[in-house]
Image: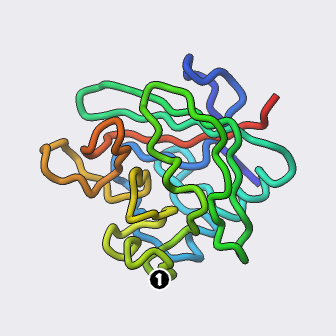
Amino acid sequence: MTVPCESNLPEAGAGWTVIQRRKDGSVNFNRTWSEYREGFGNLHGEFFLGLEKIHLLTQSQPHELFVFLGDFFNETRYARYNNFVIGNEKEFYELKELGTFSGTASDSMQTHINQKFSTPDRDSSNNCAKYYSSGWWFSNCYRCNLNGKYINIDNGTDVNGIEWRWWKARPMKFAQMMIRPLE
């Protein structure tokens, strides 16, 4: 399995596997269950690694999750969780654990714990995946959705894009999710 690595973020340290990246809207994240399961996009640009790969990487030992975010005003923030666990496909890749939060972006993921992953064609989230045209661990519908529609500008009104609500309830320009084994 080919996976992209990241080692140049001072906030994160080295040794991370990138599992999701959004930066320019070049890849449509309104995808089917099978596409989210297998992964899609360009590993050098925007992509989602795939739920099955993420599950396989994280099932053998504890992993931490690092989320790096950027807005349209060139401000960046991050969120780190020290115990990222998702279930298998029979469990709909449920977000089982995140562990303890640290970082500068506020904690927008905790409300998504115990939520099944949903896509527009396999929606267990009261139609949130259909409404927001993306796959995610939706919870009433969300406090963050890093797979939302890419909006090319922060116009202050359209909040249904890539979002991390407790930092800014506005579209993000950049989002990257990374995991690495706990030391």
Look at the image and name its color scheme: rainbow
The answer to which of 47 and 171 lies nearer the viewer is 171
Left/right placement of residue 111 relative to residue 72 reads right
> Which residue sits at x=38%, y=78%?
127
The answer to which of 144 and 111 lies nearer the viewer is 111
Left/right placement of residue 93 relative to residue 75 reads right
Q: Quadrant of residue 51?
A: bottom right
Q: Position of residue 76 (x, y in %)?
A: 38, 26
Q: Position of residue 29 (x, y in %)?
A: 42, 63
The residue furthest right is 60
What amino acid type is highlighted by mark number 1? Answer: Asp
Which quadrant: the C terminus?
top right
Left/right placement of residue 77 relative to residue 153 reads right
> Which residue sits at x=72%, y=29%?
15
Q: Position of residue 62 (x, y in %)?
A: 79, 43
| On screen, residue 166 above or below 131 | above
Which quadrant: the N terminus?
bottom right
Left/right placement of residue 25 relative to residue 138 reads left
The answer to which of 137 and 53 lies nearer the viewer is 137
Near mark 1 (Cα within 10 A), the count class, few <14, some 14-19 or many ≥20, is some
| On screen, residue 25 above or below 179 | below
| On screen, residue 62 above or below 47 | above
Q: Which residue is mark 1?
A: 121
So how many labels did they put on this image?
Answer: 1
The residue furthest bottom is 121
Q: Quadrant of residue 164?
A: top left
Q: Position of residue 74 (x, y in %)?
A: 29, 25
Element at label 1: loop
> Which residue sits at x=77%, y=50%?
58
> Which residue sits at x=64%, y=73%?
92
